[in-house]
Image: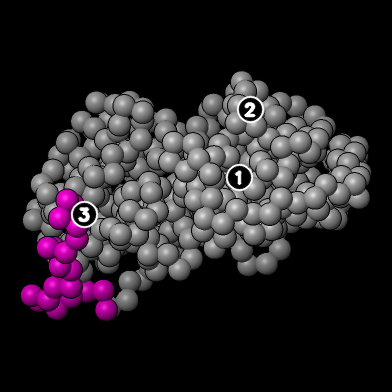
C-alpha cells in the first residue's frame, strides 16, 4: 500500500490522440444535439430500469420519536451539519417525517428508522468526532430497545440506520482505525444506509445500501452554464494529491493513486489538475470531458455527484468501490473505471476511448433521471436520492422469517466492542 507508482514516460502519440479527441468532442457535441437522435440515450440492461420506480405503496416506515439530544440539539449546536457531505442523515429524517411511506402505527411498519445524527458532533475544523459517533449511535439503539418492543423482536434486523461516515458504521476517518473497530456490534443485524462502499471490506456488511454523499443541489443549480458550451478541458481535477500532515510521501494517502496522478500528469497540457479550488470550480466541470474521482482516505467523495450533475464523465479510481444505488444507476455506462495501478497510463486510457462511447456517456449523463438519483433535494423530488433509498429498502422486502427471533432469544452482545465505545454518552 505504501509503494510509489512508476512515473510514465511522455508519449507524443498519446498526447496527439487525446488532442484529437478533445477537438472532436468540442466540435461534435453541438452537432450531436442537433442530429435526428434521442436527446438522452436509452439505458440498456436491467440496471437503470428501476431508476424511476415509485416506492410509495411498496413499504411503510415507522420513525422513532427520539429525545432531542440525539438529533435536533446537535444540529442547533452546529449548523455546519446541514451543509457538509455527511448531511444525508439529517435530510433523510426531515424527508421521512412528511413522506407518504411513513406510518404512525408501528404494528404495520415494514421498517423502523432511528433518527440519530452521529456525524453532527464536529471538531472545530468541521469533521465528525470519531469517538463520539459510536457512543451516540449505541446510546440511541439502547433507548429504542428499552422504550419500544420492536427492536427486540429482531435485534434490529428490520431497522435501518443512516451512517454517512467516511467508513460507514465503523465510524472513523482513518481506515486502519475503522478496521480495528469494525461495524458497531449493535448494528450488525440492521440495514446500513451509508456512503462507504468497498467490496470485501469489514466496514461494508451484506445487505447495506450504498448512497451518494450530500452535495447541495441549490448551490449547484446556481452555477449551471449554457449546456451548449463546448467542453474544452480534457481532464479536470481539483483536490489534494498528498496529505502532507499525515502522509507527506503520498504512498498511504489514496493508496498512492493521487500522488501518481500529480507525478505523471502535472505538466501534461491535457490535464487541468491542481490543489487550488477556484470560484469557477462548478463551471469548469461543465467545460470538461472527464472528471477524476479518485479515492482519498475513503473511496468516495462528493466529486462523483458533482461530475454526474454537471455531465462530466466520472473517471473512477478506487479499486473495489461499491457505487451508490448500483442496482439502479448504470455506472458502467456513464463512467470510466481505471485501476489504481494503471494511473500512470491514464492519458492513453482516456485517449483510446472511442468518440462514439464518449458521446453516448455524455447523452446518458444528460438524462435528468440520472442527475436526480444522486441528489437529496429539499423538498424531495420523484426519483431523487431519498426515493432511491426507499426503493432499495422496498426491494429487500418481505423480510425472511429468520429475522424474527424466538421468545427470549438474543443474537447481539451488548458488551462487545472497543472499551472506548462502551462508555456512556
Measuring 62% from the left and 34% from the top, which residue is drawn there? Answer: 238
Magenta-drawn segment:
402-421
> Quick one: label 1, few (<14), some, or many (20+) residues within 10 Å?
many
Residue matched to label 1? 259
State yes or no: discs 3 and 2 in contact (Cβ < 8 Å). no
Residue at 39%, 38% (x, y): give it: 87
Residue 355 coordinates in the image, percent (x, y) = 86, 51
Q: Identify the secondary structure beneath mark 3.
A: loop
The answer to which of marks 2 and 1 sits earlier in the sequence is 1
**295 vs 234: above or below:** below
Is 410 within the magenta?
A: yes
| Residue 343 appears in the rendering | yes
Mark nearest the camera among 3 and 2 is 2
Real-space Cα separation, disc 2 to disc 1, in angstroms: 21 Å
Q: Is residue 107 left or right of residue 203?
A: left
> Which picture quadrant has residue 16?
top right
Tell us which disc is closer to us: 2 or 1. 1
Packing grade of label 3 (10 A; few <14, some 14-19, many >=20) is: few
Asked if residue 22 lies in the magenta stretch, the reply is: no
Query: Circle 1 — which element?
Result: helix
The picture places residue 111, in percent across and down from the top left corner, at 30, 59
Q: Position of residue 222 (x, y in %)?
A: 60, 23
Q: Which residue is mark 2?
A: 281
* Quadrant assignment for the C terminus: top left
Q: Reading the chain from its start, which is encountered first: label 3 or label 2?
A: 3
Foreground pick, 176 / 8 = 8
Q: Residue at x 64, y 48 (%)?
A: 260
* Foreground pick, 185 / 357: 185
Vertical relation: 347 (above or below) 83: below
Amino acid at each position: 500500500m505504501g509503494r510509489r507508482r512508476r512515473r510514465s514516460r511522455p508519449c507524443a502519440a498519446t498526447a496527439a490522440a487525446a488532442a484529437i479527441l478533445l477537438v472532436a468532442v468540442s466540435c461534435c457535441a453541438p452537432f450531436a444535439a442537433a442530429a435526428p437522435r434521442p436527446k438522452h440515450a436509452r439505458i440498456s440492461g436491467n440496471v437503470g430500469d428501476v431508476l424511476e420506480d415509485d416506492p410509495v405503496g411498496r413499504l411503510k416506515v415507522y420513525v422513532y420519536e427520539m429525545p432531542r439530544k440525539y438529533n435536533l440539539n446537535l444540529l442547533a449546536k452546529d449548523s455546519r451539519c446541514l451543509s457538509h457531505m455527511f448531511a444525508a442523515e439529517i435530510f433523510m429524517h426531515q424527508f421521512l417525517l412528511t413522506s407518504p411511506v411513513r406510518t404512525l402505527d408501528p404494528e404495520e411498519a415494514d421498517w423502523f428508522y432511528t433518527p440519530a445524527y452521529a456525524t453532527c458532533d464536529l471538531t472545530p475544523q468541521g469533521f465528525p468526532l470519531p469517538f463520539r459517533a459510536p457512543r451516540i449511535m449505541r446510546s440511541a439503539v439502547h433507548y429504542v430497545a428499552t422504550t419500544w418492543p420492536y427492536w427486540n423482536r429482531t435485534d434490529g434486523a428490520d431497522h435501518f440506520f443512516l451512517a454517512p461516515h467516511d467508513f460507514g458504521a465503523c465510524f472513523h476517518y482513518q481506515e486502519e482505525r475503522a478496521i480495528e473497530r469494525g461495524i458497531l456490534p449493535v448494528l450488525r443485524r440492521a440495514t446500513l444506509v451509508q456512503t462507504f462502499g468497498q467490496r470485501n471490506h469489514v466496514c461494508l456488511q451484506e445487505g447495506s445500501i450504498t448512497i451518494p454523499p450530500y452535495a447541495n443541489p441549490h448551490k449547484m443549480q446556481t452555477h449551471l452554464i449554457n449546456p451548449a458550451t463546448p467542453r474544452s478541458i480534457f481532464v479536470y481535477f481539483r483536490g489534494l494529491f498528498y496529505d502532507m500532515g499525515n502522509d507527506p510521501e503520498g504512498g498511504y494517502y489514496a493508496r498512492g493513486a493521487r500522488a501518481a496522478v500529480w507525478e505523471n500528469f502535472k505538466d501534461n497540457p491535457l490535464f487541468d489538475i491542481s490543489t487550488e479550488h477556484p470560484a469557477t470550480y462548478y463551471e469548469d466541470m461543465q467545460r470538461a470531458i472527464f472528471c477524476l474521482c479518485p479515492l482519498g482516505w475513503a473511496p468516495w467523495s462528493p466529486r462523483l455527484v458533482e461530475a454526474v450533475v454537471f455531465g462530466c464523465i466520472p473517471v473512477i479510481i478506487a479499486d473495489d468501490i461499491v457505487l451508490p444505488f448500483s442496482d439502479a444507476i448504470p455506472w458502467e455506462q456513464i463512467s470510466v473505471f481505471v485501476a489504481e495501478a494503471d494511473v500512470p497510463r491514464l492519458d492513453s486510457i482516456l485517449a483510446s476511448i472511442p468518440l462514439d462511447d464518449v458521446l453516448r456517456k455524455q447523452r446518458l449523463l444528460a438524462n435528468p433521471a440520472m442527475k436526480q438519483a444522486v441528489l437529496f433535494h429539499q423538498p424531495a423530488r420523484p426519483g431523487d436520492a431519498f426515493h432511491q433509498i426507499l426503493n432499495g429498502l422496498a426491494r429487500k422486502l418481505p423480510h425472511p422469517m429468520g429475522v424474527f427471533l424466538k421468545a427470549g432469544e438474543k443474537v447481539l452482545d451488548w458488551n462487545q466492542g472497543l472499551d472506548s465505545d462502551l462508555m456512556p454518552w
